[in-house]
Image (cartoon, rainbow, N blue to C red):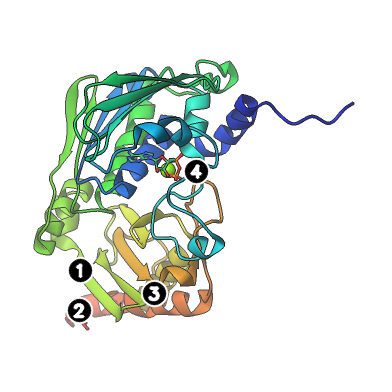
């Protein structure tokens, strides 16, 4: 057997296995790109659960005509130049893999216009045969990416797509999480031409709770306790439901990036266990803002997990912060009232 370098398309398709699991993961990558591009309005159109079409429109920075082909190439990114940047990541993306991966397993059209350009341009790549076609198009400032026929050329992967309804539910859930990561961005989600969600931009922090109510339900917004702790460098804020609530909205964010991180969940669980002896976690929406140099987000391609440089310290900080709002079980019977400690 001889050793050979994989053809580019095959390499991208293999990489796509890590990033592009299902339509919702395509949506995640594309919406994160829009947020990184500074968009304040994002429209997400889905047809047939994303099997047929995923279209993301934004009013962000746009991509230069000269860079359209590059944007679709592997390891091409505008967000990272050096190792030093990697240790101080403020953008959601940085691996330069998403567009290359997605275009290797779909028919992808990228239309864009920067403010500086007079005209808009469109790039088309089918199954990413390396030959990207570029032609003029009409488009306002910003970017639209259309992903058609996901996995059309990887039948084994296409077989794993679930029903349209299931795939759309994954997308809806993802957009809820993203909606709570950026209150200042307006997000619209349509399915088969019907508006399913409309999250209007909330520029006033006091209005944030309205979006929480939209995502997690009115009951969550009414019953939850606001929590705030720490200072620049390491800060936590958000909403936690009281002991015994059975709303299971459990969202956590680190530097506005949605997370499913073991250390964070462990700290929250421990707080409920220590104070109330409760193992089942009630709902919460918690934001942790930390100096980007204190956290490594390059742990997994999908970036669900982070590694804190000072894990112990962060864990105990979260534990103490949450304990402030967990009312001990027995106090509920004796009627003792606790106030939330705002620092
Ligand atoms: P990454 O986000 O890791 O840089 P991607 O493959 O997702 O990699 O995107 C490649 C590059 O294409 C980005 O670095 C960015 O410069 C550009 N890009 C992608 N989507 C958009 C968008 N919606 N608006 C502006 N630029 C974009
Ligand atoms: Mg990206």
Q: Residues within 10 Å of mark 4 (few under 14, many from 20)?
A: some
The image shows a total of numbered marks equal to: 4
Look at the numbered disc 3 and give the secondary structure of its residue.
helix
Contact, mark 2 vs mark 1 (Cβ under 8 Å): yes
Q: Earlier in the sequence, mark 2 or mark 1?
A: 1
Q: Which mark is residue 96?
A: 4
Disc 4 versus disc 3: nearer the observer? 4
Q: Quadrant of the N terminus?
A: top right
Q: Residue at x 33, y 49 (%)?
A: 36
Q: Are the two marked residues, 3 and 1, in contact with CB atoms closer than 8 angstroms? A: no
Tell me the mark number nearer the camera, choosing from 2 and 4: 4
User: Where residue 214 sits in the image (x, y, percent)?
Assistant: 16, 47
86 sits to left or right of 238: right
Q: Which one is in front in this view, the residue at disc 3 or the one at disc 1? A: 3
Secondary structure beneath dot 1 equals strand
Q: Position of residue 229 (x, y in %)?
A: 28, 78
Decide if residue 132 is on the left or right side of residue 175.
right
């Amino acid at each position: 057997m001889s050793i050979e370098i994989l053809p580019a398309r095959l390499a991208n398709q293999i990489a796509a296995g890590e990033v592009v699991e299902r339509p919702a993961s395509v949506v995640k990558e594309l919406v994160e790109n829009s947020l990184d591009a500074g968009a304040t309005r994002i429209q997400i159109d889905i047809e047939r659960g994303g099997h047929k079409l995923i279209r993301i429109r934004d009013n962000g920075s746009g991509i230069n005509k000269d860079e359209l082909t590059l944007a679709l190439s592997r390891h091409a990114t505008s967000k990272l130049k050096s190792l030093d940047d990697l240790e101080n990541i403020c953008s959601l993306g940085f691996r330069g893999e998403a567009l290359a991966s997605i275009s290797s397993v779909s028919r992808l059209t990228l239309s864009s216009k920067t403010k500086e350009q007079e005209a808009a341009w469109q790039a088309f790549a089918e199954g990413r045969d390396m030959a990207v076609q570029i032609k003029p198009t009409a488009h306002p400032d910003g970017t639209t990416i259309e992903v058609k026929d996901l996995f059309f050329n990887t039948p084994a992967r296409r077989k794993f797509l679930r029903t349209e309804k299931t795939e759309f539910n994954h997308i809806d859930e993802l957009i809820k999480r993203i909606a709570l990561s950026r209150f200042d961005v307006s997000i619209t989600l349509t399915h088969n031409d019907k508006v399913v969600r409309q999250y209007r931009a909330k520029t006033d922090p006091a209005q944030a709770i309205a979006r929480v109510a939209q995502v997690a339900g009115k009951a969550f917004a009414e019953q939850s306790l606001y929590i705030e702790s720490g200072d620049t460098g390491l800060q936590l804020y958000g909403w936690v439901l009281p002991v015994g609530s059975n709303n299971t909205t459990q969202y956590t964010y680190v530097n506005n990036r949605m997370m499913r991180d073991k250390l964070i969940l462990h700290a929250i669980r421990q707080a409920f266990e220590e104070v109330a002896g409760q193992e089942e976690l009630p709902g919460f929406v918690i934001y942790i803002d930390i100096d980007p140099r204190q956290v490594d987000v390059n742990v997994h391609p999908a970036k669900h997990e982070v590694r804190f440089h000072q894990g112990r310290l962060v864990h105990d900080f979260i534990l103490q912060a949450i304990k402030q709002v967990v009312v001990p079980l027995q106090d509920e019977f004796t009627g003792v009232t606790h106030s939330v400690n705002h620092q």
